[in-house]
Amino acid sequence: MRDLFRFLFRIRNTLFFLLLMGLCVAWSITGNEHHKASALRSASDLVGGIYSWRNAITSYADLREVNERLSLENARLKDLDQHAYVPVAEKWVRIDDTLHQQRYTYLAAHVINGTSHRQRNSLTLDKGSLVGVAPDMGVVGVDGIAGVVTKVGPHFSVALSVLDPDWNTSVLIERTGHRGLLQWDTGDPRTASVVDIAKHAPVRPGDTVVTRGNDGIFPSGVPVGVVIDVTDAPGSNYHTITIRLAEDLTRDGPVKIVRDLFRAELDSLDHSADMP
């Protein structure tokens, strides 16, 4: 405390000057309407600037929560999408004019870790069995398919990425309807191949590739990529098709986990068909 008093005593002249200057400014403002208006305007600008700065900081801090709300809203809208429903068979009595039955539901999730340059790549998601995630559920990113769930814990799950040569899924050339298999054999995280499409199919660069559906993983019509190259090797009956993947699998971010409500029925039928 003694040091504080000594410091204040040393700067007593400066403090006295600041006090006099403050009194002069106050008298000038209160005694002149023009000065008063200018001071109020400056004070308003200053306060507005401070509020804008504070709002920018709080808005940035709230971005994760905002993104989470948007992701949940996206999942809700996906539940209403046409591709999540299949036609209901005609009945003798139509109740409430119900023409479609929901087949797919979507759960908002985030990729919290992933690989893209290994021989086999995976995605770690921040949702697990406690919210209904199970193996063999599809994972769809912002722009296209991303992979399929393989391992599930209570709070997290791991999905096999599209960038895995041991996994493929059925796809369609949207323009022609010809079907093939998506296969990652390029070693490039931005591209993949579509195999098993016969040479007579008129595939050309710029064609859109989408999911075929009906495999219990993805709905039909989900973007997969765009054809960038078509070559025909001598002696082969099939095109060699290279596509640029729609989804950027080198980044983390929001995804949707897809649940096929008809999957149990499909699995049951496949099991009975395999039995002798």
Image (cartoon, rainbow, N blue to C red):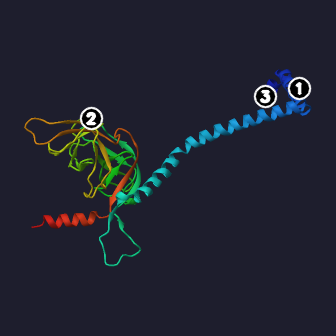
> Where residue 240 is drawn, which disc sits there?
none
Looking at the rendered structure, the kind of residue marked 3 is: Leu
64 to 229, vertically: above or below: below
Q: Quadrant of the C terminus?
A: bottom left
Residue at x 24%, y 49% (from the top left corner) = 171
> Where residue 188 is drawn, which disc sits there?
2
Q: Please report whichever mark, 2 or 3, sits nearer to the chain's N-terminal start.
A: 3
Looking at the rendered structure, the kind of residue marked 2 is: Asp
Q: Position of residue 226 (x, y in %)?
A: 29, 41
Q: Point out the frontmost of discs 1 and 3.
A: 1
Q: Is residue 231 left or right of residue 42?
A: left
Front residue of 170 and 1: 170
Q: Position of residue 156 (x, y in %)?
A: 37, 52
Residue at x 31%, y 78% (from the top left corner) = 92
- Give the alpha-carbon distance from disc 1 to disc 3, as whole Å: 22 Å
Q: Point out the frontmost of discs 2 and 1.
A: 2
- Give the alpha-carbon distance from disc 2 to disc 3, as whole Å: 68 Å
Q: Point out the frontmost of discs 2 and 3.
A: 2
Q: Position of residue 210 (x, y in %)?
A: 29, 48
Q: Please report whichever mark, 2 or 1, sits nearer to the chain's N-terminal start.
A: 1
Q: Are marks 2 and 1 in contact (CB under 8 Å)?
A: no
Determine the image quadrant of residue 90. Answer: bottom left
Q: Which residue is mark 3?
A: 4
Q: Position of residue 86 (x, y in %)?
A: 32, 63
For disc 1, the neighbor class at 10 Å (few under 14, some 14 to 19, many from 20) is few
Looking at this view, name the residue that lies furthest to the left: 235
Looking at this view, name the residue that lies furthest to the bottom: 93
- Give the alpha-carbon distance from disc 2 to disc 1, as whole Å: 73 Å
Q: Which residue is mark 1?
A: 20
